[in-house]
Image (spheres, rainbow, N blue to C red):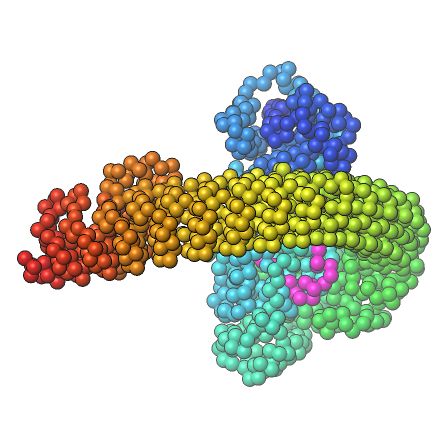
Amino acid sequence: MAEGSSTESQFSNSTIKSYVRLGLVAQKELPNLLREILLKKEPPDLLEDHLHKNNFLSRIFNEREWNIIKNACTNQYSDFDIPLMYKIIRHLKLVLAPTGEWHNKIIPTWCDNSVGDDVNRIRWIWNDIIYMYRENVNLTDAELQIYFSFLHDIAGRLEDFLEKPKQLVKIFKDIQACQIDQETEQRCLSWLKDLAESENALNSGDVHRDSTALKGMQDFQRKVFTLPYSREEIIPEKRRDDIKMQIEKWRSKDEKFVATRAADNVMKCIEKNGCVTITGSAGVGKSFIAQHIALALEKGGHQVIPVLNPSDIKNYYHPNKFQLFIVDDICGKFTANQQQIENWRQLIPVIETIMAGKRCKIIATCRSNVFQDDKFNILSPFKTCECNLTSEDLCLTSVEKVCIAEAHIGTCIKDLDEISKHHEFFPLLCSLYQEKEWVDVKESFFSNPFEVYRNELDNMSRQGDEEKFKVCSLALCVLFNNQLKETWFHSFKVTDQQRQIIEDTCVGCRLNKETSKVDLKDALEKLEGTFVCKQNGVYSIIHEVLFDCLAHYFGQRMIECIIEHGDCDFINERFLWKNLPDDQGSNVELQIQIPDDKLDLFLERLVHDWSAGKVLNLFSNSNMKVQAFRYQLLQYLEQLDKSQQIKLANTKNTVTPEDVSDSDTYPLIWASYFGYSDMVKWLLENKAKVDHCRHDGVTALYMACQNGHNAIVQLLLDKNANVNLYNEGCMTPLYIACKNDHLDIVRMLLEENVDVNLYDRDGRTPLFVACDNGNTAMVSAVLEKNPDINLSDDEGETPLNIACYKGLNDVVFALLEKNPDVNLCNILGDTPLSTASGEGHNDIAGALLDKNPDVNLCDDTGGSALFLACEKGYTGIVASLLQKEDIDVDLCNKKDNQRSPLLLACCNGHTDIVRLLLEKNSDVNLCDRNGNSPLYLACSKDYIDIVRMLLESNPNIDLCNEDGETPLVIACQNGYTDIACMLLEKDANVNLYDSSETSSLYWACLEGYREIVSKLLENGADVNHPNDDGSTPLIAACQGNYNDIILMLIEHKADVNKQMYDGDNPLISATYNGYPDVVEVLLTHGVDINRSLHNKHVLTEAIHNLPNRILSSVKREWYEDVVMSFGSSITKEYVKEKSVDYVFDVFAGSPPLHIASFMGQTDIAKLLLDHKANVNVKKKDGTTPLFYACEVGHEDIVELLLEKGADQKICRKDKTSPVDIATRNGHDSIVMMLKGKQ
């Protein structure tokens, strides 16, 4: 989008029409969408009451908004605007929170499609329409189309949520296509103009947009939601070509890649994480591994993008593509670069949003000393997953070193392990050796590579001009910090700056000052492949380790030239004054020492950069950490003209992009940040404005308070620094000092006219964060200033509540001395007392009770303090609560499952708490929403002592839950004999049944609980009561093979011939389960030996008449649970090729002998035959037991049947005889047996 004119009249006619359509959307339809959500989730007549109940919500609305809220019931939200509705939906949590967060400055990514995400989108689009109109942004027709495509998607998703199919999308399509009359156009433009000019509209509450702070985000946000509708490639063609060439170079080098455990680890990490940082010292292979992984992911479909600048990530990100960004040497190639860290810090919200989409990944390489620098810690995405190539787990093994040497050199090297111990950059040495075969100095190259390179440079310098040109061109690479652009050589015309650089460099290299740019460029090209590479139009040394060597070499040889002309970052990172301590990191041996006689020259360069707006370069210089160096700098500054000193003191950083926070940072802010009190003092003496702030609101005082620089805080306060200024997050100096635990600074600030009640964007006050940190001394100091201790954050949390949650006794006691409102609750309804009770903080609960809180207040689920303490088993707290006379011991969590404190204590086995509650006459018959009584739950968990206590309180022993289960039923079902006996002693009804008509006796028989069965029978249990399926206790016992229980039941007159819905009876169950002992017992007690399962027609009808049975499921059960579980191996093998319908047909209408013959139950078949089972009994289709035995192949059963007179001539109705089926199935021995009996 191009910026338009400053007046509406200069808009094109097309843009005016576009704004009219978007104005109609913003004025009416976007509010309507939020209004529909409100009406669905929050009845208007309840709104005001819900908002007043929460302390935080009651204060975030202004007077105008409250007047609107009070009329909600009458107007049904018709006069509610977007900002107000957004606040209500967000803070009442009417929908699930968006994927990112509420009030996110970045629009949700394309894949985030929850209702909360769409609410965020609506707010963002409404805000953006007004912002664009205010900033006079021209809209093209294509861009308008993109907006409406986006709106159609939102409306489509909300149609489902609001249950308004095909209604909402049509509205937006009509606005997009309708004819707009003059009156509508003027009315809409007038509304946009009024709203755009209103400070309240753009700077209130949740829709605040700081146009300066967010201007850098605007293009990225619009691109994120534009891309799904655009087919254009977002990477410029020239950049795409450069990337392609770069990746091809990677591919060529990758031919010599050697697989290592480190590379395998990086691959595993990037598969699981969105961002991986590969760390290690220079030359260990960080970049090589990153490039290898990138090539592998490219094969898998990822678009690989090498990052040149941090902004590449936001500019080239595409929400619909799988992408991999490669960031090499993030935040510094030698030391941690503060400016680069700040540049990346600005992008953290963008990076986090992108990574949330799961398609985009980032691999960064970083030197260990940079990664471990404290300043790097703010880059949280790059700290989440580190692969340290020099760690014990990932460093090169001996075998890997040999493989790398052979891959690059072809032969092994003497003392390989010893050399690699001295040089972690062994992989690089192999690569450098290959680039320029140092045959004559092979061993010395690997033992002392830097010396070899220095000797080579010295040799080149002693030869003719051609070799000196090469040395000079390498010096230029050093001057330009390894980023010598090809364009620097393009013009034949030499600028004054270029002439001076060339002349001074040539003098340092002992060359004629008249050397041309052409000669130097030619020399660079001749060095390509050995010393130099060219990529993206930039000449650079082939590796940073070699560059380190060259930088040190030229830094000592031509130090004046480099100090005067060297790149700012180079000067900042690589020069050390001799007075610096020796422990400045692993790079100290390659840093350039500044002789005393060159110190003034170095200081002059730093001050020159400062005056040019490169403020951060000075204050982040590593030398500035040493007071002696700063003393020398101050001495130098004092020699300057006073006017120049004042100008320097008020020169802000101007060399960084506008969208980076440091772009307008003043020296005083940086000096305060780094803790240089001597510099702060000099700056203040030279009229530095003490309250200067960056565009994000950060002041010098804020920085000093944030980092704990006491002396600087005092200096700033002495200059009357405004202690109440706050940054864009609404954090004041006092807030950040409390948050970071700087007690002395807090005390200093409190002595000033500080507003202790100012809160941050989340509603948190200094007192809140002090309590959150648990710093009692700090809390006491803040309390001395009488803050409003009842102020809550946007979650409704008060300082007292957070201290109670964390169990901070001393903090709570200090707060209670100030008499806070102990009944304030957060948005979840948690009070300080309920919080302390739920967390088990006895002393805190006791202290709160001394303040007489409302002990019966409940949270959003209906849980009271007593409820929570009983749930968790905090006996001491329960005892304290029960001492309050107004405690409601039976208060249930009505919004959840309606459980009482007693019920919870019984459920969780808290015996002592149950005793305490019963002593307070808690209702023992109070059931939860599912009808479970305390006695039932205690019985279900086998809590004998609790059951005994409850029974002493004379409960309704036969109360059943919604499933019809009584305490006795559940005790018998689980085999809790002692509890069952206790219940029976209290005359529990043994003949009550659950919802499936299953009795206590049935459950005990099914599980084989003999003692319980005996007790139930003694107490008159109905021995023949069937459940819904018609199954009786005897059938259950037969299915379990419990002979002793079967005999007990028969002794108590159990009906041995009782049938289930399908005709199953005790004998049939025992038969197909394969229990011969049970069969024998039944046969001796009068069982009908020939009674069969119901035939197919009757069985199908019976199943259709049972609500809990489905024919297909029954067939599957017969197949899997009967045949494939209890059949013989021969039967299983035969049936596995058959269908469930086949098995169903077999069992339907079969008597026991048929089933035994089919299942291969030989012993049972013999018992049945011995007890005169009809050997020739036929099913409806004419099938006999002999037929099934012949079909499946049970020879022993066939022989038994024939011995008992089975008639092999009986055929099925289809004329198939036993011999036919045996022949068909290949049972030759059975065929011979049958023919032998003919």
Could you tell me which residue is drawn at 70 percent across and 47 percent down? 919
Could you tell me which residue is drawn at 73 percent across and 55 percent down? 339
Tell me where residue 244 appears, x and y as whole percent: 51, 54
Is any part of residue 404 visible from this angle? yes
Q: Nearer the viewer, residue 575 or 741?
A: 741
For the N terminus, which image quadrant? Answer: top right
Tell me where residue 904 appears, x and y as whole percent: 62, 47
Is-magenta flag for residue 376? yes
**Above/below status of 286 relative to 642:** below
Tell me where residue 1065 appears, x and y as whole percent: 30, 47
Could you tell me which residue is drawn at 20 percent across and 57 percent down? 1170
Q: Nearer the viewer, residue 157 or 767?
A: 767
Could you tell me which residue is drawn at 84 percent across and 58 percent down? 675
Question: Which of the 4 image quarters holds residue 1126?
Answer: bottom left
Question: Which of the 4 image quarters holds residue 1203?
Answer: bottom left
Magenta segment boundaries in residue numbering: 362-378
Q: How many marks?
A: 0
For the C terminus, which image quadrant? Answer: bottom left
Is-magenta flag for residue 398? no
Q: Nearer the viewer, residue 432 or 351?
A: 351
Judge from the rendering whether residue 534 lies leftward or rightward of residue 1094; answer left or right: right
**Above/below status of 935 relative to 1043:** above
Q: Nearer the viewer, residue 507 or 891?
A: 891
Instruction: Give the residue at the far left of this rendering.
Output: 1238
**Above/below status of 832 relative to 452:** above
Tell me where residue 642 appears, x and y as whole percent: 93, 53
Is any part of residue 313 visible from this angle? no
Instruction: Give the residue at the far bottom of this rendering.
Output: 414
